[in-house]
Image: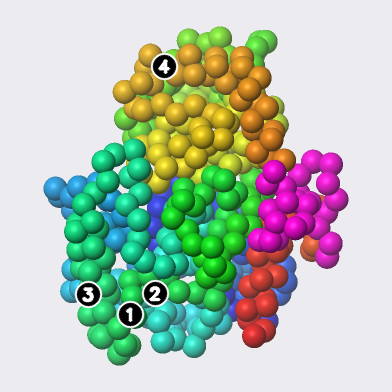
């Protein structure tokens, strides 16, 4: 038995927690002990459920940056993204890094699995453990610098600004490492040095694919883990007509106009609205719309849906596409917008800016429902990716999709069915790292 620490530091929503929970399940079934250090413990009850009682699973709060910085421009590259996570000031980042170092010492993992967790990686430098990066493409920057200006929809930021950001972040990292008794980084990209890079999702939809190198140091795309079971059973509005599933957040600037458009029909819509109370959710219901204050069981709902409306979170969007469902995406920040642009380029969905939602959402939903081109693109995209999932090599058929056999040697899942092949392959890779 080995002990592993699964860390989540940056990013929001349920995607990080759900993916790490699936991996924790696979590791626990193999007899290992798992510590979870999560940014947001408020989702733990809903996502982990009875797993919280497991004798070999422990849950910890992740040391995270909570301050809001005023007058900060939108991040132009990954270094500026780290500014918003505490990397402007070595004095304050040192506290977070010391918190992570203390957590590593308290848990004593043989392997750190870092999901958007740069400060966990910083604190782990010089420690006797292996490291595995885990997450969607935006969370794992290119292995070699300089990091790109990723706001491709705008005039590129000046090279001097990008270089200055990297220099400042590396200087901050080096000062923090000195306080931990560790040598400086050889380069800023070395912050994300790891024994393995596990990129979740499909190569064509990797937000940073245009800037990745071709060497093995970049890591591999392992496909999409199946949507974990759990959540509210889908309760669609009564009647006839197509079904539209939605995952939105109450704080999204376009949430109100999006709900207004869906309330008008003619599709029957079921929307999980993160951040709404059950009472307010019920007040939003109309004959065409049902709003849920609880996450909806994607594994149950997506096979019943003909379209999906979301904020371009990688997890839910990839789950919809994998189920053959075209999407309408309402991105709110750079990561989501980059990913949405990849989906649109593949012909699998429509992107709407916040100011376009009130007038355009109804037309966009009608387009993805009425044009066979969207459904054809989704099917073609999903079919191409079955060779990627669960292997990271592109040579093995994805065993987790309908009509395909279970992966060879897959352990049984908690419900007695075959284990998800993507997660099974990643768990086996974790074990290989532990053995070497």
Residue 113 picture location, percent across and down: 52, 69
Residue that label 2 marks: 190
Residue bearing mark 3:
171
Residue 71: give its label: none
Residue 257 appears in the picture as rendered:
no
Give above or below for 129 relative to 413: below
Structural crowding at the residue carrying mark 1, measured as other residues with C-alpha within 10 Å and reported as few (<14), some (14–19) or many (≥20): some
Residue at image mark 1: 185
Task: Say which of marks 4 and 2 sits in front.
Answer: 2
Locate residue 252: give its quadrant: top left
Mark 4 closeness class: few <14, some 14–19, many ≥20 residues within 10 Å: some
Q: Secondary structure at mark 2?
A: helix
- Circles 1 and 2, Cβ within 8 Å, touching? The answer is yes
The correct choice, above or below, for 32 with respect to 368 in the image is below
Question: Where 71 falls versus 135 (above or below)?
Answer: above
Q: Separation of disc 4 and disc 1 at Cα?
A: 48 Å
How far apart marks 1 and 2 lie (CA) works out to 6 Å
Query: Residue 362, can we see it?
Result: yes
* Span shown in magenta: 384-409
Q: CA distance from mark 3 to mark 2?
A: 13 Å
Report x, y in % for residue 46: 54, 48
Instruction: Give the structural element (helix, strand or loop) at label 4.
Output: helix
Q: Residue 431 at what x, y percent from top left?
A: 67, 76
Q: Identify the mark at residue 360; answer none if there is no mark.
A: 4
Q: Earlier in the sequence, mark 4 or mark 1?
A: 1
């Amino acid at each position: 038995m080995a002990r592993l620490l699964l860390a989540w530091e940056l990013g929001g929503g349920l995607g990080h927690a759900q993916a790490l929970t699936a991996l924790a399940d696979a590791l626990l079934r193999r007899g290992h002990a798992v510590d979870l250090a999560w940014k947001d413990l408020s989702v733990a009850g809903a996502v982990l459920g009875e797993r919280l009682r497991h004798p070999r699973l422990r849950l910890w709060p992740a040391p995270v940056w909570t301050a809001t910085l005023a007058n900060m421009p939108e991040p132009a590259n990954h270094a500026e993204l780290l500014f918003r996570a505490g990397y402007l000031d070595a004095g304050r980042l040192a506290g977070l890094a010391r918190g992570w170092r203390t957590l590593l010492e308290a848990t004593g993992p043989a392997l750190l699995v870092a999901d958007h967790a740069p400060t966990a990686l910083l604190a782990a430098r010089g420690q006797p453990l292996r490291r595995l990066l885990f997450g969607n493409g935006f969370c794992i920057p290119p292995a070699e610098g300089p990091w790109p200006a990723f706001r491709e929809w705008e005039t590129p930021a000046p090279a001097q600004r990008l270089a200055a950001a990297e220099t400042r972040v590396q200087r901050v990292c080096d000062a923090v490492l000195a306080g931990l008794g560790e040598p400086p980084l050889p380069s800023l990209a070395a912050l994300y040095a790891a024994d393995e890079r596990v990129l979740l999702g499909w190569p064509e939809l990797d937000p940073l694919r245009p800037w990745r190198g071709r060497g093995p140091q970049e890591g591999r795309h392992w496909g999409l883990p199946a949507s974990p079971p759990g959540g509210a059973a889908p309760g669609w509005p009564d009647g006839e007509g197509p079904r539209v599933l939605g995952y939105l957040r109450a704080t999204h600037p376009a949430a109100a106009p999006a709900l207004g458009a869906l309330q008008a029909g003619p599709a029957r819509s079921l929307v999980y609205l993160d951040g709404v109370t059950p009472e307010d959710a019920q007040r939003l219901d109309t004959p065409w719309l049902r709003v849920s204050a609880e996450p909806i069981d994607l594994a149950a709902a997506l096979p019943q849906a003909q379209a999906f409306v979301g904020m371009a979170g990688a997890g839910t969007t990839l789950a919809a596409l994998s189920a053959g469902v075209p999407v309408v995406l309402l991105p709110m920040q750079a990561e989501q917008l980059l990913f949405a642009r990849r989906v649109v380029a593949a012909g699998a969905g429509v992107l709407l800016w916040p100011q376009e939602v009130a007038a355009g959402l109804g037309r966009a939903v009608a387009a993805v429902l009425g044009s066979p081109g969207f459904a054809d693109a989704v099917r073609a995209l999903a079919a191409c990716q079955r060779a990627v999932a669960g292997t990271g090599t592109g040579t093995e058929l994805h065993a987790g999709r309908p009509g395909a056999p279970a992966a060879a040697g897959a352990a049984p899942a908690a419900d007695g069915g075959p284990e998800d092949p993507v997660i099974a392959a990643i768990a086996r890779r974790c074990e290989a790292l532990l053995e070497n």
